[in-house]
Image (cartoon, grey):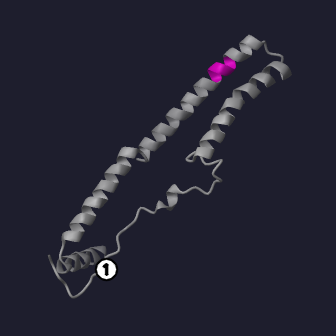
Amino acid sequence: TRTSSSTTFLPMATDGDKSSTSNLPFWLDPGTRGGAIFLSFILFLLPLVGYSIATNVFGVDEVEAGKWIGVGFTATASFLWVGTYIFRVATKDMTYAKQLKDYENAVIAKRLEELDDDEIQALVEEIERDEF
């Protein structure tokens, strides 16, 4: 065990978890249960409304309207889903990347805890010297 008469305060950088919180109401935020239910409900109604408009307003044959709305909705939903996946990969907003970053931060914090106060002070001085 080590004892020290002086305590050094070293603030650690944070990721800024404010970016993960949303300003949307819970029923519009797709990251919440309410948002997932609301979005599912909208995605359920969208093809039905499109079918109704196509058959009643534009007079398209029911079978043709159903076929094209089904294909169009499936293709559009698939394209959007793949797009969100590619975006998350490009921004490294994936579960593995987050877990790896958390692990690396925990290892650094554990190593920092094991250092003596003199070693921490020397690191702080070296960092301050490198910043200028």
Q: Say which quarter of the image contains residue 58.
A: top right
What is the span of residues highlighted in magenta in the rendered image? 68-72
The residue depicted at 60 percent of the width and 24 percent of the height is: 74
On-image quarter of the C terminus: bottom left
Q: Mark 1 is on which residue type?
A: Phe
Q: Is residue 92 above or below residue 69?
A: below
Residue 19 appears at what percent x and percent y? 51, 58
Q: Residues within 10 Å of mark 1 (few under 14, many from 20)?
A: few
> Which residue is disc 1 drawn over?
9
Q: Is residue 63 above or below residue 102?
A: above
Residue 52 appears at what percent x and percent y? 79, 23
Q: Say which quarter of the image contains residue 122.
A: bottom left
The residue depicted at 44 percent of the width and 47 percent of the height is: 91
On-image quarter of the N terminus: bottom left
Instruction: Please identify the residue farthest to the front as the structure is shown.
Output: 1
Q: Say which quarter of the image contains residue 42.
A: top right
61 left or right, relative to 95: right
Q: How many marks?
A: 1
The residue depicted at 35 percent of the width and 45 percent of the height is: 96
